[in-house]
Amino acid sequence: MPSTKKILFLPGDGIGPEVMAQVRRVMDWLVASGRASFEVEDGLVGGSAYDAHGTPLHDDTMKLALAADAVLLGAVGGPKWDNLDFSLKPERGLLRLRKDMELFANLRPALVFDALAEASSLKTELVAGLDILIVRELTGGVYFGQPRGISDLPNGERRGVNTQVYDTHEIVRVARVAFDLAGKRDKRLCSVEKANVMESGLLWREEVTKIGTTEFPDIALSHMYADNCAMQLVRQPKQFDVIVTDNLFGDLLSDCAAMLTGSLGMLPSASLGEADANGARKAMYEPVHGSAPDIAGQNKANPLATILSFSMMLRYSFDMGVEADLIDQAVRDVLADGIRTGDIMQPGKTLVGTSGMGDALLAKLAAHG
């Protein structure tokens, strides 16, 4: 039997429990077929954790996350908790997980499945076959820099301040992750900043260049200003393979790239920490979509983004590329057969619910053996 992988399941709120249930079915299939062995703990996060414990993430759950080989999260939030104090909002649980696990590298694929290429807002020929990976620095930059805040000025006006700041080690560690991933793909990396007008961007460019020259000479490194990158993503997106960028630009560019695919319901993500002495990293995987409270509990949610997040877990945390490829191919096959949930429904296709999509996927996995 393969070594047992220790996973923490955090279904969260809204559609989270429904889509995570389909992941559990895929896991069970892998175990039953002798391909994997998993030890799964279940926990609460977000609004469900607040309802049970009065906090969006209980300390005991945080301990489970730190002890796990990887964490899989569904979704957090919903209008039920909108009036809570900021410190108690469901999203604070997610942010604590990222902070305490020291997850500094966010991986956001923008993958267009052939069967869904026409759903993109861009012309089909521009996005067919698109496979981009954006690596976003997650714990530094303008979202966390000091000083920050709003102050009153002597002239009666007010001033809002946020500080964009990066130290060498923050740039170097996320760059290494991006170079490493580029080496496993097409050996091309584009580093994105605003070195023409920002000193932090100039430092970013210099440090990424230094790492590329000294440690990854086999990777073709290019540089691009963030505004041009945004334009190029909607002009000729297939020119990119792996993009590495800071927190602010990564936030904007990953959402821009996401819409090239036609549906947030299809997009997975990963957040990785520093490698330990054995090369293992703390990691959390989650779909990009939110908790969708308007369809929660109705068997309408698309589980594929969460299933693809699990596939990323197999690939990046457990070195189970064969099994990840198997799941990814099953997703392609299901879509090619015209099976659709409501968010990706097209004329002439077959509408199914959350469990129906799970049924179709498991049938394809069984067919592949």
Image: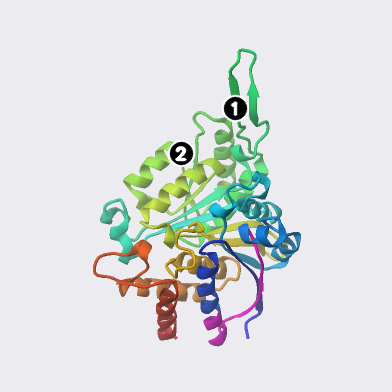
Q: Where in the figure is residue 283, as x and y percent of width and height? A: 63, 61
* Badge number at residue 160: 1
Instruction: Tell me the residue at 68%/33% (across/down).
Output: 146
Q: Nearer the viewer, residue 295 or 127?
A: 295
Q: In the structure shown, which secondary structural element does the residue marked by tag 2 occupy?
A: helix
Please give the count of numbered marks on the rendered protein. Answer: 2
Decide which of 207, 272 is in the foreground and name it. 272
Give the position of the C terminus as an image quadrant: bottom left
Q: Is residue 34 visible?
A: no
Pick whichever, 225 or 215, lies toward us.
225
**Mark 2 belongs to which amino acid?**
Ala
Is residue 60 placed above or below 126 in the rendered structure? below
* Front tag of 1 and 2: 1
Image position of 10 (left or right of 132) = right
Where are the magenta residues, as a range? 28-45
Compare marks 1 and 2 and give the one earlier in the sequence. 1
What amino acid type should be assigned to the residue bearing mark 1? Gly
In percent of width and height, residue 51 lies at 66, 60
Q: As drawn, is 292 to the left or to the right of 102?
A: left
List the residue tagged with mark 2: 226
Going 42% across and 67% down the picture, which residue do you hit?
A: 300
Q: Residue furthest left?
A: 348
Q: Which picture quadrant has residue 280? A: bottom right
> Is residue 131 rendered to the left or right of residue 280?
left
Taking the image as drawn, is residue 75 in sight? yes
Q: Is residue 39 left or right of residue 250?
A: right
Which residue is at a point 71% across and 56% down the rendered structure image? 54
Determine crowd level at label 1: few under 14, some 14-19, many 20+ residues with C-alpha closer than 10 A.
few
Residue 205 position in % (x across, y down): 54, 39
